[in-house]
Amino acid sequence: MLAELHKSTPEENKEQRATFGLWLKALREAEGLSQRDLADRLSLDYYTFISQLENGRGKIPAHRYAEWAIALGQEPKDFVKTLLRYYEPLTYQILFEEEQAG
Amino acid sequence: MATILNFRNKERASSAHDFLTDETEKLSFRTAEDGVVSIGEMSSACLPSPLPDPRKDWRNQELADLFRVRQLLIGAGVPVETMRGITDEGDPWFIYCHFNGDVFIHMARIDGIYVLDSPNVRRPLRGADFNALIADFTTDALPTFKSTGDDDDTKRRVVRLERGGKVRLHPSAMLAALIWTLFLASEELVLLTPEDHATTDDDLLDFSDMIFPAGFEIHTVETESADIASLTSADAAKDLSSDILNTEAQVQIRDGATTGQQGLAMHQNAFAMGLSTIAIAMGFMSEAVLLDNQRKVLDGLKALGFTGDGADAQDADLTGIADNAQDSAFLAKLAEFLGIDLVIGDEQAEVAQIAPKTSVLQDDLTHLGDEVLTADKGLPPTKVIPPSAFQDKNTEAKTPVEGTDKASRAADALTPAKATETATSAEAAKDSTKISSLSEAIQVWQQTQAKDLHVGVIEIKADLDMSITDAYALFTLRETPGEAQSEVPTASTFDPMSQRLIDFFMSKGSDIGIIDQANGFLAVDREAVKSGDVTYMEWETDDGKLIGLIGFASDFQQFDMIA
């Protein structure tokens, strides 16, 4: 049976995204990239978007998940799985709760 | 494995052509004991700092403008969240978000260039300053608005702001209008509450679902039967006065807040209309959007029972007003939005039928002449005016101030133009004269020499023959009703800025009219108005009074009031 679901509060969402931002920053720094470098790799119009994401605001566009994974030197599948955990925690829980319980 | 140094281009660094041009030049590296690699002969001070330069952060004026934009959006009934930060290179950014965390405006200053991005622009806007951003938007980046059928830019009504021109707008006002336009164009506007009920494209003015968090309760009261004391209860007044962020919309979104829904709707729409008006004037927004919103406002007023002007307003017909709504409503909202009170008063009108305590005040003011006050008429009814989002500090329930019914004012457009057919304008005939400019509105008011104006159920006293000294004394006396004033404040008791203003007018010797406002006064140089070349200034005195001045720009420059 599915676990009882509850709607995330805005505060929980913010906390999730803040944690995701820190994780994203750690990946970038591990890759030895500055924010501008990462933005150049991703052909972004303005590199301040990276800083915004790392501060827990905004989202990576879904159609660019794979590009971001490659730019950060990550396996796309694992990268997207982690994204889902932060962006859609309830969906992640549904899909992977057995794996978590195990 | 060798550590590769990443050389970034610096403004003051030597160019690539200068680097190692001499074959005898050498570049050496030095490795410290802790393993840090540095360029041999260069001191660490010359190397880029790993920490961002705080001097590159937003300047105070920029922050003030950005937060002012936030306040304007909140005043327009769209509470937004903001956040700012600095990149690892020290470039600042600032975002505006919905309550759900979605970012709809991203602003940044990158290498000295301002960038603004939104889901509703084709490409990020860029410019050397805020004005350039706006220019970039109007010239190129207008993307998703429905065509009005007129693609000729030359026919679009666009206000061009030029140095020395007659129209001046605060940069944050223009920026707020731009962001407001982008917000309205957001497709997410109709998708915010898909679970609750279906939204339509006509719900642009209905922000109730998106503004208020889930579970919030709105307590509404009937305006006309409202207990003023409860509306200005200690809690509400405290909230309103304690923080500049406690705007009308903020009070509304507090759980259990008790306020007039009608007043809130009008307050939201006033700011929204103001922003829309500026957006149209600047060429951001289609007029069709504003006109549609305006019709909604007027329909809403009809439904709420706010009609017309005059003491017997309940039976007044809105159609006459609606006929002039296009121009007069635009001007009224724009004047209000820009802080130019033609009719005086502040937002959030609730009529307090408090018995005027006029005897002592009236005695003290008889020296102003019978033209100002008549023996058989007391001072206008006083009421409590909650503070505006930006300026008003009069939050004490006992402070007698003059004001106007906001809803009536909104429905009434430019009251002076309507209340001047007869000397006793309690049941002023509808004025069909079209007012096409702010100066014309002032002129019409002056020509009629109206002493008693009625806006809704509020009676307002106005006199354009009062001297500036008396005007200042008048609202100073009203601060302490019932207390006999031993002497009228003299010029020497004014703060320096007020004194400067008084000296300016006295030395000028031109025909000056004074419009008494709730929290100050507005001085109008009639010569400037007649010439059509008017400039408006407003400032706050040390004691919180607002002094407005309409006059020649050259006069202001002469007295160092403007650059």
Image: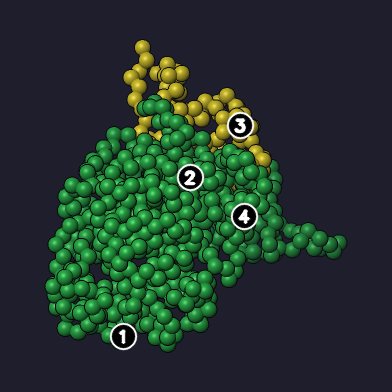
Chain colours: A yellow, B green
Q: Nearer the viewer, mark 1 or mark 2?
A: 2
Closer to viewer: mark 1 or mark 3:
1
Q: Is residue B243 above or below residue A19?
A: below
The span from disc 4 to disc 1 (Cα, nearest Å) is 46 Å
Closer to the chain start, of discs 1 and 2, is 2
Q: Which mark is residue A64?
A: 3
Residue B291's disc is 2
Same-subunit check for callouts 1 and 2: yes
Q: Nearer the viewer, residue A45 or A51?
A: A45
Numbered disc 1: what chain? B
- Pointer 4 and pointer 3 on the same chain: no
Q: Is residue B59 left or right of residue B399?
A: right
What's the amino acid at mark 3?
Answer: Arg
Q: In the picture shown, does residue B56 fall above or below B122?
A: below
**Secondary-structure class at tag 3:** helix
The three-letter code of the residue at mark 1 reads Ala
Residue on which disc 1 sits: B491
Give the residue at x 37% y 41%. B299
Residue, disc 4: B135
Label 4, label 3: how many angstroms apart (C-alpha)? 31 Å
Mark in the foreground, 4 or 1: 1
Q: Residues within 10 Å of mark 1 (few under 14, many from 20)?
A: some
Residue at 51% across, 48% down: B179
Residue B199: x percent and y percent? 42, 30
Q: Earlier in the sequence, mark 4 or mark 2?
A: 4
Amino acid at circle 4: Ala
- Helix, strand or loop at label 4? It is helix
